[in-house]
Amino acid sequence: MALVFSLLTFIILLGVVVVVHELGHLVIARLNGVFCEVFSFGFGTTLFSRKDSKGTEWRISLYPLGGYVRMFGDSDASSVKEVIPAGYTEEDMERMSAHRKKPWQRLLIAAGGPFANFIFSILVLFTLSTINGMPEYDNTITVTSESSLAYMSGLRTGDAITKANDTPVKDFEELVTQVKKSVGKKLALELKRGETTQTIDINMFKEIDGKTEAIPVLGISPNGFSYKAVSVWESARSAVASTYFIASENIKAMFKIATNKMSTKNVGGIVSIFKVSSASAEAGFVNFIMMVAMISTVLGAINLLPIPVLDGGGILISAIEWIIGRPLNKRFVSAIFSVGLFAVVALMLLGLWNDLSGFKFFGSIKDSLESWLGHFFK
C-alpha cells in the first residue's frame, strides 16, 4: 500500500505541474489565433476524448505522467517542426499555425507555459497563507537524507540549532543565512539534542586533486513551525517573493553547474521527485500542496533556460528574429534544436544517474566505474 500511495502522489504532483504548464501554452496560443488541435492529459493510447466548441480535442490518455498540447502545424507534440496537415492550405497555415505567427506572438506562446507554472505557484501559496496563515519555522531541522553532508557530519532530524558560527539562531531562516555565508568555509554549529548540548564543525568544502571545491548544500529542511495570521496583502507579497526566490535560485544553480562552479551531483532526476512527492504527502495535505507549488516553480524556471527544445530556447530565437526583423536560417535552427535536445537528454540522464547512485547497488557500480575511469585517464 505504501508503494501505491507513493505512486499516486507522484502521478498527481507531476500531472498537475505539467498540465498547468501546457494549459499556459494553450491559453496564450488561442489568444493569438493559433488552433490547438489536441490537449492530452497523459500520454499514449487515448482512453477518452471529446472536442470543444473551438475544435480542440481534449483527451485522457493511458499513461498519466503529465500531458501535452499539439498546435496546428506541429509535426509532433514537441512543437519544433512544422508540417501542413492533410487537407489544409498555406492560407490555413498562415492563419492558424503558431509557426507562422509574428516573433513577439511566438515569444508569448513559448513563455505561456513557464509563467502559468509561476502563477499557479503564487495562487497556491497565497491561498494557503490566507487560510492557514504564514508558517513561522523554529530552529529545529529535518535532515533530508542519509547521504547528505548534514547526516554524515552528525546532524539528525529534530536537532535544534542554537548557534551558527557563534551567531544565535532563533529560526530556520537565520540558520540558512549562516549556512550560505559558510559555503566553501567551515560551519560551526551549536545544537541541542534532547537534554544535551553539543558542537559540530562542518567543512562546507572538499579537497579534490589538491583543489578546494565548495559544497553549497548542507541537506537540511525546516522541521517545527507554527502559523501566524497575516493580511491579504502580506499573503500576496509573500507568495510572489517565495515563487521568485525558488525560481531564481534554481536558475542560478543551473548556470553554476554549467560553468563548473557547482557540482553536477546537485542535479536530481525523476527518482528525486518521486521521493519528495511521497515524503511531502506523508507529512500532510498542506505540505504536499506546498511541494506541488514548489515543483511547479522549478519546472517553470528550468523551462526558461535558453536551451533550444526548452521554452527558453524558443523565447530566445523569437526574440532574436523580432530584433533582426527576419527569420533565422531553418537549417541553423534545426541544428541548434538537435544540440538542445542532446543537452536536455544528457541532463535528464545525469539526474537519473545521481538518483540511482543513492542506492547501494548502483552506488557500488558508480564507485567502481569512477575508479576505473580515473585509472584509465591518468
Image (spheres, rainbow, N blue to C red):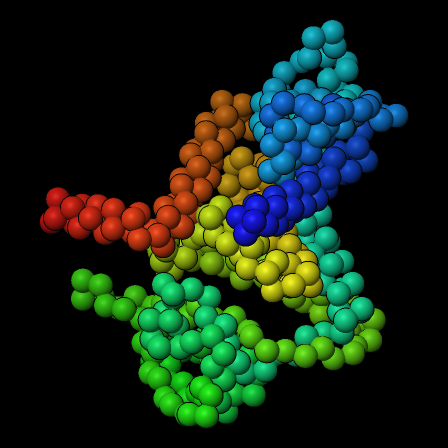
Q: Position of residue 298 (x, y in %)?
A: 58, 53
The extreme right residue here reads 53
Q: Nearer the viewer, residue 73 or 199?
A: 199
Residue 120 higher or lower than 329, as above or below:
below
Residue 341 left/right relative to 153:
right
Q: Nearer the viewer, residue 331 or 92?
A: 92
Q: Position of residue 131 (x, y in %)?
A: 80, 68
Residue 142 higher or lower than 281, as above or below:
below
Residue 120 higher or lower than 69, as above or below:
below
Q: Position of residue 263 (x, y in %)?
A: 36, 58
Q: Quadrant of residue 200?
A: bottom left
| Picture residue at 47% right of the left edge, 48% below the top | 271
Q: Position of residue 98 (x, y in %)?
A: 70, 27
Q: Nearer the viewer, residue 115 or 37?
A: 37
> Is residue 69 in view?
no
Q: Nearer the viewer, residue 260 or 126?
A: 126
| Picture residue at 60% right of the left edge, 32% below the top | 63
The extreme front residue here reads 1
| Picture residue at 69% right of the left edge, 25% below the top | 47
| Picture residue at 68% right of the left edge, 75% below the top | 135
Residue 363 left/right relative to 331:
left
